[in-house]
Image (cartoon, rainbow, N blue to C red):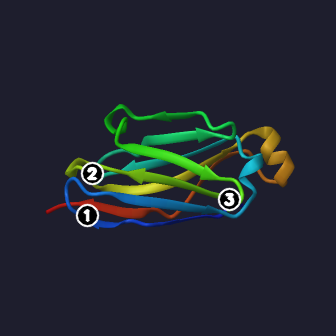
Amino acid sequence: QVQLVESGGGLVQPGGSLTLSCAVSRSILYINDMGWYRQAPGKQRDLVARITSGGSTNYADSVKGRFTISKDNAKNTVSLRMNSLKPEDTAIYYCNVYLSSASANFFSLRPGDYWGQGTQVTVSS
């Protein structure tokens, strides 16, 4: 299994900042694709940001310029820095890793998506 443990969520006022962190139980040097998703009440889970093993990133249009995804290979963590938070950013945020066939083979795991348990972010005055 790949265990993902998120931390850093909480209540913040509009315009404030939070940093989410995801601790990954396997070496992220061998994981091609990692990211953050979010799910608001009554809505589907949507991509927020992704980062590849090479450091390439992509973001949802709604968070571009405000959120930054990063990773620390030495600590096996993936972080999401969220600035200028808005009420519509309120959601449960989930850490995700995708194991390709090659990565899955390396870890002796099944390929596919692995998810954390989620951390609540509430933006409200």
For the residues labelled 1 and 2, say whether their Cβ atoms are less than 8 Å apart.
yes
Of the 4 image quadrants, the one containing the N terminus is: bottom right
- Residue 32 in the image: state x and y as whole percent: 70, 40
Residue 76 marker: 3
Disc 2: CA contacts within 10 A as few (<14), some (14-19) or many (>=20): many
- Residue 45 in the image: state x and y as whole percent: 41, 46
Which residue is pictured at 27% across the width and 61% down the height?
122
The mark total stands at 3
Disc 1: CA contacts within 10 A as few (<14), some (14-19) or many (>=20): some
Q: Nearer the viewer, residue 21 or 119?
A: 21
Q: Nearer the viewer, residue 25 or 1?
A: 25
- Residue 75 in the image: state x and y as whole percent: 68, 62
Which residue is pictured at 52% across the width and 55% down the height?
79
Q: Amino acid at mark 2?
A: Leu
- Quarter of the rendering containing residue 11: bottom left
Tell me the element at label 1: strand
Of the 4 image quadrants, the one containing the C terminus is: bottom left
Which residue is disc 1 drawn over?
A: 12
Which residue is pictured at 28% across the width and 55% down the height?
90
Q: Amino acid at mark 3?
A: Asn
Q: Is residue 13 left or right of residue 82?
A: left
- Residue 43 in the image: state x and y as whole percent: 31, 46
Which residue is pictured at 79% across the width and 53% down the height?
109
Between the C-alphas of marks 3 and 1, the distance is 27 Å
Q: Nearer the viewer, residue 110 or 37?
A: 37
Does 66 sit above or below residue 95? above
Mark toward the start of the polypeptide (2 vs 3): 3
Q: Amino acid at mark 1?
A: Val
Between the C-alphas of marks 1 and 2, the distance is 8 Å
Which residue is disc 2 drawn over?
A: 85
Tell me the element at label 2: loop
Tell me the element at label 3: loop
